[in-house]
Image (cartoon, rainbow, N blue to C red):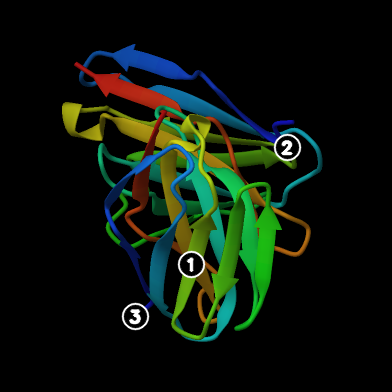
Amino acid sequence: EDQVTQSPEALRLQEGESSSLNCSYTVSGLRGLFWYRQDPGKGPEFLFTLYSAGEEKEKERLKATLTKKESFLHITAPKPEDSATYLCAVQGGNTGKLIFGQGTTLQVKP
Amino acid sequence: GAVVSQHPSRVICKSGTSVKIECRSLDFQATTMFWYRQFPKQSLMLMATSNEGSKATYEQGVEKDKFLINHASLTLSTLTVTSAHPEDSSFYICSRSDRGGETQYFGPGTRLLVL
């Protein structure tokens, strides 16, 4: 059964304090791993798609990496506006469906 | 800019009534769209896959007679919650995939409150 586990559930950082969010997954035939940002009361906003182990993608202060078992979302020198829930999802080859993790709620204090 | 829109953004209804939620693909024709539900403090759960011109595919445990999906055009899918009850109160979000069928782009969501 395809499964996604994110840690930690919640993370509090001071502005400028870099950290990483973890997404561990098990999936049959990975087609893609996705990172989304979700603000309260809004739909998820697409950040990255990773397809194979070793792949990395960057966007502003965010960098996503992928191994065969997990993905990390690195946040460098975060700002208060980076506060949100970050969702990880995988798409398996068997079903093609997106399976989401529970998310990590990030709070960045000024 | 946004590639998927939803209407309404919020709706309050009485128990026993039906509510229709619209989801539109704004930038290209989508033969497949998806409907998710998100309860407070929980992640997104796929409810059904909406297929243009054919029947929707429902996930296990989702009542197809209660959650009616119509994908009548390549840019519009609708979800109707029939005979809504308080336990149906949730955040409903639709999405469409990119041309490769992989990355999904989500709408802003519809908050449903059933009294």
Which of discs 3 and 1 lies nearer the camera? The answer is 1
Does B44 sit left or right of B115 as displayed? right
Q: Which residue is located at x 56 percent, y 75 percent?
A: A66
Q: For mark 2, what is the residue?
A: B75
Give the vertical position of A29 relative to B47 (above or below). Answer: below
Give the vertical position of B72 relative to A53 (above or below). Answer: above
Q: Which residue is located at x 18 percent, y 33 percent?
A: B87
Which of discs 3 and 2 lies nearer the camera? The answer is 3
Q: Report, in whole angstroms, how far the alpha carbon at label 1 lies from the one at label 2.
A: 35 Å
Q: Residues within 10 Å of mark 2 (few under 14, many from 20)?
A: many
Does A9 sit left or right of A46 as displayed? left
Q: Is residue B74 visible?
A: yes
Viewer-side residue, B78 vs B98: B98
Q: Residues within 10 Å of mark 1 (few under 14, many from 20)?
A: many
Disc with the residue nearer the chain's start (3 vs 1)? 3
Q: Report, in whole angstroms, how far the alpha carbon at label 3 lies from the one at label 2.
A: 32 Å
Q: Report, in whole angstroms, how far the alpha carbon at label 3 lies from the one at label 1.
A: 22 Å
Q: Are marks 1 and 2 on the same chain?
A: no
Query: The disc labelled 3 sits on which kind of residue?
Result: Glu
Chain letter for the residue marked with disc 3 in the picture: A
Provide the secondary structure element on which disc 2 rests.
loop
Query: The disc labelled 1 sits on which kind of residue?
Result: Phe
Q: For mark 1, what is the residue?
A: A72
Q: Where in the figure is residue A23, as x and y percent of width and height?
A: 41, 67
Q: Where in the figure is residue A34, as x and y percent of width and height?
A: 56, 61
Q: For mark 3, what is the residue?
A: A1
Does B29 sit left or right of A97 as displayed? right
